[in-house]
Image (cartoon, rainbow, N blue to C red):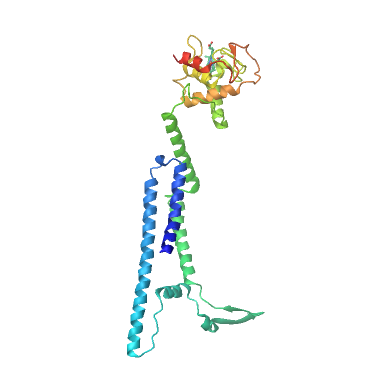
Amino acid sequence: MRKLVSIVTVLLAPLSLVAQDAGATSVATDPMIPFYLAVALLFVVALLVIVVAVYMLQVLQILTNEEARKQAAAKGIPYVPEPSWWAKFMNTATDAVPVEKEATVMLDHNYDGIRELDNHLPPWWKWLFYVTIAFAAVYLVFYHVVDSWPLQDQEYLTEVQVAQENIKKFQAANPVDEKTVTAVADPALLAEGKKIYLENCAACHLADGGGDIGPNLTDKYWKHGGSINNVFTVVKNGVTGTNMVAWGSVLSPQMMQNVSSYVLTLQGTTPAKAKAPEGNLYEPGGASSDSVKVQAMIK
Ligand code: HEC
């Protein structure tokens, strides 16, 4: 019984691993989890059934042997026990010549006392070999001839695509706004921001941010505050009565976050033609109350 318990424990161990893994990557989002668990449970149950069946078979064997021994004794003939199914199976699987008969398959060459038996290849090994041949054929046909199953690189691309769609869905469900926006640091997102800047903003603020129709974005002076929230707010809503239009209907929140973050990376750079500072000195983390300003601007 203790054996059985330890077997079950070992079998269940991977399950708890799956559960932990799933916990780390949010269970709720993967609809396949119950299915995996069901399959795993089925697997465990099947294994248990097999273990019990083997056990019953052994009991049956002991009983039959006992009966055969009694009958032989009654008839007065010597009792030769039937080899067990396991012994029979091992015999077919290995096809090895018993040690006492090895002389019949001994080859006649002898290298410094090292001699060779002419045993057959073990059938279990041959079966495995045939299985690999069959597997190779199936693999070749499905992966390379009819191309119906995806190769690793295709699988990777599909997964990346799914992940990107999930990111889009998440961003659509949780759009960044004036209050929640944070400056991104990911080089890819900043590169995205730069692209948006060059396409939409450089006409008035110049490609290097030096300022022309719009203010200089590289200095510490800001008309509307220099925090990421301030910049995002100006970009989203524009400044009424000026050439700075609202980009909220043109760019997605994500794009505005990226371009605003990029604008802040221009701080401290030296543009070719710097426009004179406008507005007030803004120190990051300084006392100027961003949130109050933002509130006033959102209205
Ligand atoms: C048509 C010209 C024009 C374009 C295009 C333009 N801006 Fe502006 N921008 C201005 C002007 C003019 C102002 C100053 C508004 C004011 O006087 O309050 C300004 C102000 C700003 C400010 C606030 C600066 C400060 O001192 O507080 C930021 C940030 C800014 N723009 C970013 C952008 C970004 C990012 C884009 C591109 C998505 C962009 N602008 C596109 C003209 C433009």
Give the answer, above or below, for where 32 lies relative to 7. Answer: above
Of 144 and 297, which appears nearest the observer? Answer: 297
Q: Name the residue rendered at 62%, 81% in the picture.
A: 109
> Which quadrant of the view contains residue 203?
top right
Give the answer, above or below, for where 27 lies relative to 212. Answer: below
User: Which residue appears farthest toward the top when viewing the image?
Assistant: 241
> Which quadrant of the view contains residue 70?
bottom left
Q: Position of residue 80 (x, y in %)?
A: 40, 84
In the rendered structure, the answer to whether residue 67 lies left or right of residue 232 reads: left
Q: Position of residue 17 (x, y in %)?
A: 46, 49
Q: Name the residue rendered at 39%, 46% in the picture.
A: 33
Where, quadrant-wise, is the N terminus in this rendering? bottom left
Q: Name the residue rendered at 34%, 76% in the picture.
A: 63
In the rendered structure, the answer to whether residue 248 lies left or right of residue 201 reads: left
Of 299 and 67, which appears nearest the observer? Answer: 67
Where, quadrant-wise, is the C terminus in this rendering? top left
Number of numbered tags placed on the structure image? 0
Q: Name the residue rendered at 42%, 33% in the picture.
A: 169
In the rendered structure, the answer to whether residue 60 lies left or right of residue 251 reads: left
User: Which residue appears farthest toward the bottom when viewing the image?
Assistant: 76
Give the answer, above or below, for where 253 lies relative to 4. Answer: above
Q: Position of residue 201 (x, y in %)?
A: 54, 19
Q: Position of residue 79 (x, y in %)?
A: 38, 85
